[in-house]
Each structure stands twice: as C-alpha cells, then as structure tokens.
Amino acid sequence: MSFRVTPQVILNSALANSSLEMSRLADLQLQASTGKRINAPSDAPLDLSSLLASKAQDLRLDTYLSNINSAKSVLDTSVSSLQDASNILTKAKSLAIEASNSSNTAEAQNSIAQEVDELLARLLDLANTQSNGRYLYGGVAVDTKPFVETTDSLGRIQSVTYQGVDQRGAMLISPQHTVDTYYSGAQVFQTRNRQTTVYTGNTGAAAGTGTDTALGQGTLQVRHTSTTFAPGSGVQAGASSAAGDTILGASGTHKLTIVDTSGTGAAGTVSLDGGPAIAFTNADTDLAVTNGSGDIVYVNTTAIAAGFNGTVDITANGTLSVDGGASTVPINFSANQAIVDSQTGAITNVASSGIARTGDAHLEYSGTSDVFQVLMALRDDLRNTRGLSATEQTAVLSSRIGEIDRVHADVLRTVGEQSASLQNMESLSSHLQDVQVTAKKLISELEDADVGQLVLKLQAQQNLLQATFTATSHVLNLSLLQ
C-alpha cells in the first residue's frame, strides 16, 4: 500500500500543529492569570497527591487554630470572671474579720451584713457569666442558666440551686489534644470537703466518732427529762425538777453536798458541785440549788436522813434532737450517738459523754457549705438570726473566716487550671502555626508557578506559535502548480 502526501494531509498536519501550540500557549496564559502551576489534575499527576495532602493538612490546621482562638476567648472571659469572684471572697473575708470583733454594735453588724448581701448578689451574677451567648459554668449545658436563686420578701438570697451538669464542655485543638472550656459550676462554686463538725455552746456536747451527713448549719437541742440521786441521803427530785433542772450527766457528773446542821434532818445546807450553800428545811419540796456555773437542780429535802453529812452522786437524764424537737433520742452519755433528722434523714454523730447541762449547741458542719451558703451564713450570723449569745456569735463569725478561705481556694484552683490551659494553648498555637507555614510553603512549591520561568516560557511559546502560523500560512498558499 502506497502512502501519498497530499495537500490535504499537509494542511491537516499544519492545522494540528497550530492547534497544539495554541493549546500550550493557553495553558501558560492560564498559569500566568491564576499564578498556579497546577490548574487541573493532568497538569502534574505525580505532584497532585502531595498537593492534596498538604491542602488537607492546611485546612485541619486552620480548624485547630480557630478552635484554639475560640477556646482562648472563653477561658480568658472565665479567668477574668473568677478573678472578680476571688476579689469578692477576699472582701468577704475582710468583712468577717471585722465582724468577729466583739466590740461591734448590732447596727454595725447589720451594716456589714448588707455589704455581704451585695457581695453575694455579685457573686451569683459572675457564676452565671456568658461568653458569646453561652454560659461558662453549666458544663455541657451551655444554654441553661446554671444557678437559680430563691429570695425572701426583702429580695435577699436564701438559696442557690445548680441546674447545670457536671460534665465539662471541651474543644478539639489538635489531633491528640482537647481543652476544657465550659466548666461545671458545681465543681467551681459548690465543692465540699467535710471536716469535723464544730459545736458552739456550753452543753458539753461534742463531735462523735462517726461521719455526719448533715450539711451547712444546725442546732442540737439538749433537754432534761429526769434527775435521780444515789440512795442514802434521803434527798429527792423537786417538784420542778423534770422541767426546771438544767444539769445533765451520768452518775457522778454532778454532786450534791448535804450538811445536816440539825442532826435530825430537819434543817441544814445543800450545795451543787461545790457551789454556794443553800439553807434547807424538811418543809422544802422544790428548792432550787445552783452551782458556780449557774446550773440548777430542784430538790425535795423533806426526807433528809438524820445526821447525813456528805456528797450524793446525781444522775440527770435528757434527750437530744437535731430537728427542732420533732424527734428525740435519750442521752446515753457515750462516745458516739447517731442522731437522725426525721425531716431530712441526715445524721449527726454526737459525743454525749461530756454533756453536763441543757441548752442548744449550734452546729457547723464544716466543709459542707458551698460558696453561696458560706456567704449566706456569714450574713445571717451578722444579723444573729439564730439568737446566739455575744460569745457564740463571735465564735461562729470567726469560724466563717476558715470557710471563706476553703471556698476561695476552690475558685483559685480553677483559675490556676484555666491559666495553665491558656499557657499550653499559646505554645500549641505557636507550634501549629509553624507547621502550617511549612505546609503552605510546600503547597506553594507544588502549585504556584515560577513567574520568571513562566515569562520565558510564554515568550518562547509565542515565538513558536508565530513560527507555526507562518509555516501554516505558507502551506495554505501552495498552488497546484507548486
């Protein structure tokens, strides 16, 4: 088979070459207009895989850096809020120290209480701080107001309830790292660390050996029920003994000293625990005898044994209650008695062995109050809502200082944790930015066109295209004779 080079073949070949050179010029012009060496997969198939991987890494790094910036913004707001809360607690401690000065008047204490009320309201506002419309201290429940208060008729906060969740909200800031951003308010403002319950009063009651379950503050009512005397003297309980005696204790805790000055039991003196001697006759059925501490026992001296001179051991029984008398437990004068609040089921363990008199023991379940309860207790004790004596009020106000320090430490611990997170994110952000610079450099090397080389190629391709057009023109102008 013979192959002839016809004019049509020459023409087709010339046109094809012109089209090819125009296509090459168009590719170079596209690179010039976009600044990209690779505009289609076919431009550099071998480099495409590396380019796509680098671009994917760059996008991931953008996401991580954006998350870091968002997390930093949230934590910056949180740290600022908690520092304000710290300042509030510092002020509250200063007020507690001032209030524990027993020389303050009731008017001065009430004025301090008003300041504490204001601090409490400000602290509650800080606990409900938002950042970009999200609550900082509700855990993952960022759309739920974490703390809700109840107030009395005067607008004073009486209780604060947490309605967030304990799970913290976190952000992914690198393939291997997350950072906690939305903290649980219960962990920041409501941490508890139960300590030995503190008893204020002179009943002789003390903390037992068991672990209490009650929270906050309470009152232990110590009441008298009956008094009996060791046999031999003839003395008996007076008519007012059951309701009027203020002494309590196992046999021998209190002693009655009887001196029969008549020799017949008709008259003499009687004293309690070495206190002042009180004259008696055999006509006294309800004689009040007081010791040096003011404790009272009512006695019946109508049957004093003739010629009795000596001491008589007294057994004075009573009851304990932590629910205002709704339920009572007989005192057994032991190292530990578990007293149950019939209304809440909370348990208070009492060492009743040292109980010596009736009265109310004011209880501080140390370490069980959250930051709001501590400030409310300080305010209420400043107003003496429990009717404490001056000595007792001073004592409980002093105890508030330690409680404020405890809850303050919890707030500062969170500040330290969040500050450390911010510092770590700064370091991580710097590292990721360095990695991103490397990725962008590789992308540029793979994708971006070399302007200098591109200009030379464009010039060369234009010259080549011009030459092709000239050659094609000559071909198209061939005559039949030629």
Image: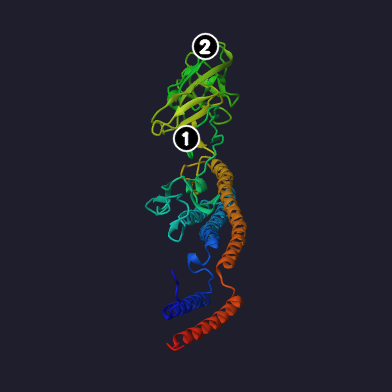
x then y, percent, for residue 124: 46, 54
Q: Is residue 286 above or below residue 373?
A: above
Rendering coords of residue 373 (x, y %) = 48, 46
Per the model, the C-alpha gap separating discs 2 and 1 is 42 Å
Using the image, tell me which numbered label, if any, was put on residue 214.
1
Disc 2 to disc 1: CB gap under 8 Å = no
The residue lying at 40 percent from left, 52 percent from top is 144
The residue nearer to you, when weighing 425 against 451, is 451
Rendered residue at 49%/69% (across/down): 39
Where does label 2 land, which residue?
Answer: 231
In the displayed structure, 301 sits above or below 114; it is: above
Q: Nearer the viewer, residue 235 or 438?
A: 438
User: Which image quarter is the N terminus in?
Assistant: bottom left
Q: Secondary structure at mark 1?
A: loop
Which residue: 52% across, 68% down?
38
Mark 2 and mark 1 lie on one chain; the one further toward the N terminus is 1
**Residue 214 versus residue 328 in the image, above or below:** below
Q: Position of residue 378 (x, y in %)?
A: 51, 47
